[in-house]
Image (tube, rainbow, N blue to C red):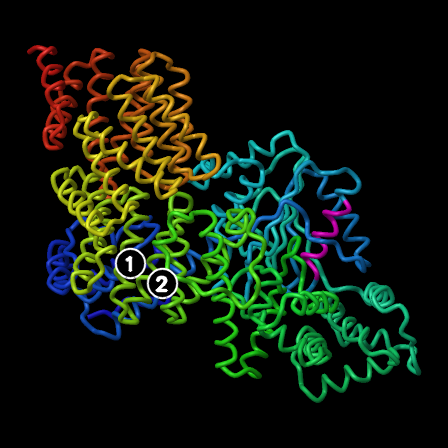
Amino acid sequence: MSDLPDLGRASTLDDFAETLRGLKTWAGNPSFETITARVNARRAVVEQVGKTTVVDCFRAGRRRLDAELVAAVVEALHPDPGYVSQWQQALRVISGETQAAAQVRVLDALPPDLPTFTGRSAELDRLRDLARTGQAVVISALAGMAGVGKTQLAVHVGHVLHEEEPFERILFVNLRGFHPDPAQPPADPAAVLDGFLRQLGVSGHQVPHPVEARAELFRRKLTGLRSLVVLDNASDEKQVAPLLPDLPGCVTLVTSRRNLGALDPVSRFAVDVFSEAEALRYLAAAVPRIPVGSDPQAAARIARRCGHLPLALALVTGHMRAKPGWTLTDHADWLDERHENRRLDSEIELALEVSYRNLPAGGREFLRVIAQHPGQDFDARAAAALAGTDLPTAEVRLRELASDNLVQSAATGRYQLHDLVRDYAAARSADEDRRADRDAAMTRLLEHYLATTAAAMDRLDPAGRTLRPEIPPPDLPLPDLGEPLTWLEAERHNLIASVTYAAAAARAGHATRMAVVLSRYLQGRYNTAALLVHEAAARVAREAGDEVGYAGALTNAANAEIFLGRHDAAARRLENALRILGRHDRPVDTARVLNNLGIANARRGLYQEALDFSQQSLDRYRLLGDRTGQARALINLGNLAGRREQPDAAVEHYREALLAYRETGDRNGEALALGNLGGAEMKRERYDSAENYLIRVLEINRELRRPNIEANALDDLGLLSTRRGDGDRAADYHRQSLKIYRDLGDRAGEACARNGLGETARARGRFEEARDEHLRALEIAADPDVDERSEQARAHTGLAEACRGLGAVAEAREHYLVAEGLWTKLGSPRAAEITEALASLGG
């Protein structure tokens, strides 16, 4: 038998799926039915799965995989615990890298220029000439050398060009192409484009999903503008290609250790170390008042010992400024001795060692501890938390490290470490600090983020406070949270990184609590991130044996699945959570799971099951006296009544829910209830009342900024406009809604909006356009991951009527027949309408 497939080469989910296909072949190529049967036999205590779900594990193009299911599939193919464990670990690494790659900070300004920037005059002149050609300029290092000054040269060029002729827009991003921390992989181009577009004024719901569409919109937004785009620290051509605007008037500077030879069209510029003359000019400018001493060649010796590398020189001059009374000769002698005694391998290592040893003990400890931060950049409060000191002390330390070029200013009030400095400081920490002290520092940071996030959420979402755990106040005073959403947006990447770090470090308590605290912020805004966060929390809770925490994380992950239109997967998670909670006395948690099962089953077209779950949830919430829970269950019962074409019953449920939400001050719930009332009133043909409700939703959402609520209201306003005969307005509303749903990854919502566009086109007599939109809606709604039965029925109905309008009677009949069957299974009175339409076709 051939060797087992090697997971070592799998670096993406597509690689992972390919390797899994190789394992299937190695195992004798059993059928998917056989694998499914083996999986279910091994999963007696959790949810059973179907063949389609198992097949999905083997498909390329997946954006996520169920870790538990993959482990069961591998075990079914080769039941060796060690081998199964290898697969679980590999998937954790790949999934973690996928998530980390999606976290990237984009700036709308250049980082500060170095006031001591000197030399490079020939390079600067040539770069200015290249920038005027209109092609992107790749600034790379000879032989891939680090510390040669690529970034600072690009930043300086950008400042010079901006002074000569100001740019209308500036965008800067660190692509993390060669970050030393595996938890900081190269940035995903799609995430970079998302950040670029938001900086260019595109609201989140208007950012398209496919990377190609984002790149095209990016180019359109920059067309006609004099702009500067700096792509710093690129890993390869694949990462950079979608980010090149390639537009007249747009200057693009790319820095990389590689020359990106396959990238076209670009101009290339290789950066070498300083010449001796440039290094001497740099030293003269950086330390102008240090006397030469007895050796007239002392400055040249210092430059040679630093290898003429700009970073090494910058670090060493920080040391030199801190030694009053020393001459250049003294410094040169000391560097020679350090090199000989320590046998340091490189000029950078020598410079880092010198700079580090020159710091006072407190400064060295501070540098070591901030190197542990799991994010790309941080503020002084995070640094203070890591170091266990007060904010003023942290601010002083950061300024001192900045003056020694050991930290860099990333943006106003934010700091970052050069990759080489971070790597060096982390290595020093591993050598000099006790593991217990490093763990204590990370505990302080995690508690700082947890407490501050909890405080922000209490102000942003006071009605949801009962759903969040009690979090003790932090050691540091809280920042000004006058605009809590602004703080959450600024720290979002770090907050998500804190959950993934905690999960990887087996800190179940932090990971599960932080995931819960973040859930209402991420929900409806960043659904994919929400799913990744809750999956991380579920994994670590399960490994820690925390059944209640595991059930809670499963419930939150299922909620994210519902928002993403993955209703079967959501139902499986919820059924598992319900089984777990059956072993514990958790009435509120159980009521919540029952309520979400009602939602998932309604989306799957299983209306009776949905009704049973929702009614059980409402009964339990009433026994508990939980008004917010009652409101949620009532909303679901109203939705079910609406799906079954019972608008009067729906209105009754929604009004009771609205009253409960207003009693508890839940503004999110109030907006939800008002939006649903608008939809129900529209079905009752009370159009003015419906419009009032829906406009009120949009007014409230200016305060809430929840895109899912806005999308629902806009879609209903589109339907309302169609009924009133205003096709132009209807199409505009549906297109706005579609953009939001696509941004959220809500495929069921996308199907709904496309059906709305189809109905609008049909009402205007544009039957070909209507057919196209309904076909797109059907393709999405029929996807096994979505399986939105009501939207499938709606799409077939629309296709039938569009085909009828085009004179394609036979095709219309086929769609009517499918629609009739679907509406019948859904228990909808619309089935009778379709029967009449079929009869009217004759023959």
Q: Nearer the viewer, residue 83 or 258?
A: 83
Residue 636 part of the magenta segment: no
**In this view, which residue lies farthest toward the left?**
843
Q: Is residue 691 left or right of residue 254?
A: left
Q: Is residue 85 left or right of residue 738?
A: left
Provide residue 532's location: percent of width, then percent of height: 37, 55
154 versus 80 height, above or below: above
Provide residue 753's location: percent of width, then percent of height: 33, 29
Q: Secondary structure at mark 2?
A: helix
What kind of secondary structure does the magenta stretch mostly adopt? helix
Provide residue 286's location: percent of width, then percent of height: 83, 66
The first of marks 1 and 2 along the sequence is: 2
Q: Residue 777 sits in which quadrant?
A: top left
Residue type (three-letter) at the residue carrying disc 2: Thr
Residue where numbered disc 1 is placed: 552
Q: Secondary structure at mark 1?
A: helix
The C terminus: image quadrant: top left
How many marks are shown on the rendered structure? 2
Q: Nearer the viewer, residue 323 or 382?
A: 382
Q: Nearer the viewer, residue 450 or 310?
A: 450
| Residue at 23% from the left image edge and 26% from the top image edge | 795
| Residue at 70% from the left image edge and 61% from the top image edge | 149
What are the residue bounds of the magenta stretch?
149-160
Residue type (three-letter) at the residue carrying disc 1: Gly
On residue 564, the disc is: none
Q: Nearer the viewer, residue 831 or 774?
A: 831
Q: Are marks 1 and 2 in contact (CB under 8 Å)?
A: yes
| Residue at 23% from the left image edge and 21% from the top image edge | 798
Residue where numbered disc 2 is placed: 512
Q: Residue 312 sits in which quadrant?
A: bottom right
566 versus 390 height, above or below: above
